[in-house]
Image (cartoon, helix red, strand yellow):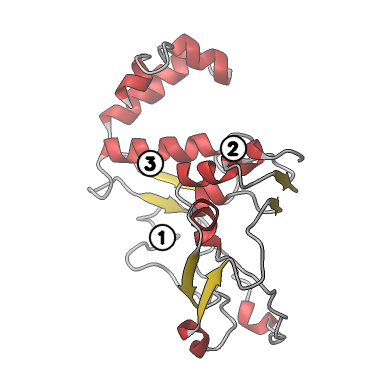
Amino acid sequence: FKDYVLGKEDGIPKTLIWASKKTGIPTRIIKVLAREWAAKATSISHSNGGPGVRSPYSTEPCRLEVVLLGMQGLGKPGCHQLTMIEWGIFGGWNPPNWKIGDDTNPAPGPVVYPSIVAANRGFTEAEMPQQIIPKLLIHEAILNPPLTWYGNTQCRYLVEDQFVQYKYPADGCSEVHMIWTDTPSWMSCWNGGNRMADAFRSPQIEFVMAQHPWIENDCEFADII
């Protein structure tokens, strides 16, 4: 990372002027933020939105966040990663010792949580397609077939299904040649970053279509958006 910042990797030093032209942020603001970051134990807090998630090239803040938290010493007092939403939706649960919404935590506390349990009308058994790939194994299925695993990974299925072995390619089925995604966040949420990028670039994948309003993450690999 140091070689990248100093320009040894690509010949472009990441100076204040370079960053200001890229972002539109004045150099003085970037300098102050960098000094604040270096001088204090700092945590990163984010939600499921904003430029760090819902925007073009949102993979880059995601990658940088990992590096910066590592430089800070992730896990030491004052250096953590925190999300501001979702906690409590499933039965009012809060992570232990996080104390969402009180004086020890800057994240705003909710006034009301919607009750997912009250809204439930039961599940109908969906017809299983002849071939499936769990979301976490998509890159491995593309790059290193054949593949086997246990359970179809759908939460509504019986416990017994967790002992059923599935495989890809399934009997009588082809390998994947086209991807149609309406949730293009495999790289930054699920599948190991560069490994998913390798899968998108595989000669096995002939066409990618992304259906998405923010042009984020995996959309950069799409033939049609």
Q: Secondary structure at mark 2?
A: loop
Quadrant of residue 32 within the rendered picture: top left
- Residue 96 picture location, percent across and down: 34, 68
On the picture, is 25 further left or further right than 219?
Answer: left
Q: Which residue is mark 3?
A: 66
Where does the image place residue 130, in percent across and percent down from the top left? Answer: 68, 74
Amino acid type for the residue under numbered disc 2: Pro
| Mark sitting earlier along the chain (1/3) | 3
Q: CA gap, disc 2 to disc 3?
A: 16 Å
Q: Amino acid at mark 3?
A: Val
Disc tally is 3
Which residue occupies 73% across, 38% down?
Answer: 223
Cα separation, mark 1 vs mark 2, equals 27 Å
Disc with the residue nearer the chain's start (1 vs 2): 2
**Of the numbered discs in the image, which one, if any, rests on residue 51?**
2
Residue indicated by mark 1: 102
User: Which residue type carries mark 1?
Assistant: Asp
Q: Are marks 2 and 3 in contact (CB under 8 Å)?
A: no
